[in-house]
Amino acid sequence: MLPHQKLIYPCPFCGKETLEVLWWPSHKAAKRSGSAAAGSKTTWRRMPEGFVLLSEKCSNCGKTAKEIEREKSFNIFELFCRSN
């Protein structure tokens, strides 16, 4: 599994690359369950990729993180696919 990556992305309002984003890829996670009588059972499930906006605001235009996340054009997955 790739580790978490800190990336720089453009602001959807001003277009300058000023936003820090923490991104992680999809991965498999184990879930263990069981009892003393039945033994343990491990199931695997696929966890989706995700991201967290680390910047509190854009240093260029001053828009807050909440305004940036609400903007429909701020799609981190689309931006990540274009950059790779």
Image: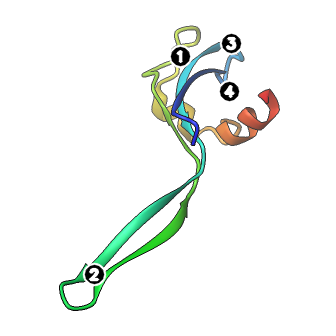
Q: Are marks 1 and 3 in contact (CB under 8 Å)?
A: yes
Q: Which mark is residue 12?
A: 4
Q: Can residue 75 be seen in the rendering of this structure? A: no
Q: Are marks 3 and 4 in contact (CB under 8 Å)?
A: no
Mark 2, mark 3: which one is toward the viewer?
2
Task: Determine whether the residue tagged by mark 3 lies in a helix, strand or loop.
Answer: loop
Instruction: State the residue position of label 3.
Output: 16
Pick whichever of labels 2 and 3 is earlier in the sequence.
3
Which amino acid, mark 1?
Cys
- Residue 71 location (% of width, % of height): 62, 38
Pick whichever of labels 1 and 3 is earlier in the sequence.
3
Viewer-proximal residue, 17 or 32? 32
For disc 2, the neighbor class at 10 Å (few under 14, some 14 to 19, many from 20) is few
Residue 36, by quadrant, is: bottom left
Pick whichever of labels 2 and 1 is earlier in the sequence.
2
Dividing the image into 4 quarters, which one contains the C terminus? top right
Mark 4, mark 2: which one is toward the viewer?
2
Pick whichever of labels 4 and 1 is earlier in the sequence.
4
Q: Are marks 2 and 3 in contact (CB under 8 Å)?
A: no
Residue at the (81%, 32%) spot, across then down: 82
